[in-house]
Amino acid sequence: MTTRQRWIVMAAGGSALLMLGALAFQHLGGMAPCKLCIWQRWPHVAAIVIGVIAFVIPGRLLPLMGAVAALTTSALGVYHVGVEQGWWEGPSSCSSSGVSGISTDDLFNQIMNAPLVRCDEIPWQMLGLSMAGWNALISLGLVVFWLQAGQRQSRA
């Protein structure tokens, strides 16, 4: 296995481990994901697929794409943390928001179509960081792995 392939395995494997962790929290821990949690999963799936392809196809483009995927989920994690902390509002479909200025019928429809999980509540945290915070931090580290995989290899 080349050095490039090792970096790819660590980068894509990191995304795979984060996905397994998220699925374990969901299916074993009973913590249903909110809309922003789901959004954070898609770039990890992309990074895993990119990793499988990049493992066998040489070049710098695929590792760069993996880095973009990891950076995307990291940015979504930061956005989600901001929603959880009340620094900014999240999507209206998964955050608590005021109900003034809407009719009773619209309010009823909003309640009936409301998601089961809110994006602005923290269901679990460790060392002061929520799952979204850990995703943001770890995914930022995965960006470094992807960039290492994309470096030109010196010839010995």
Image: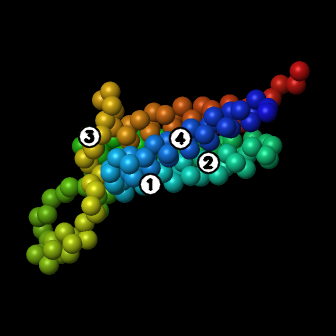
Give me the C-alpha separation between circle 1 and circle 4.
17 Å
Residue at the disc numbered 1: 39
Give me the C-alpha separation between circle 2 and circle 3.
30 Å
Instruction: Please report whichever mark, 2 or 3, sits nearer to the chain's N-terminal start.
Output: 2
Residue 120 seen from this side: yes
Q: Nearer the viewer, mark 3 or mark 4?
A: 4
Label 4 amino acid?
Answer: Leu
Residue at the disc numbered 3: 85
Local secondary structure at mark 2 = helix
Residue 36 seen from this side: no
Residue 152 image point, x, y percent? 78, 31
Residue 93 image point, x, y percent? 29, 62
**CB contact under 8 Å: marks 3 and 1:** no
Residue at the outermost front position? 28
Q: Nearer the viewer, mark 3 or mark 1?
A: 1
Using the image, determine if residue 134 lies above or below residue 54: above
Q: Nearer the viewer, residue 38 or 90?
A: 38
Residue 17: which disc? 4
Residue 87: which disc? none
Q: Nearer the viewer, mark 4 or mark 2?
A: 4
Mark 4 burial class by Cα count in 10 Å: few <14, some 14-19, many 20+: some
**CB contact under 8 Å: marks 4 and 2:** no
Question: Which quarter of the rendered picture does the N terminus lie within?
Answer: top right
Give me the C-alpha separation between circle 4 and circle 2.
10 Å
Residue positioned 27% across, 43% down in the render:
122
Residue at the disc numbered 2: 48
Residue 94, by quadrant, is: bottom left
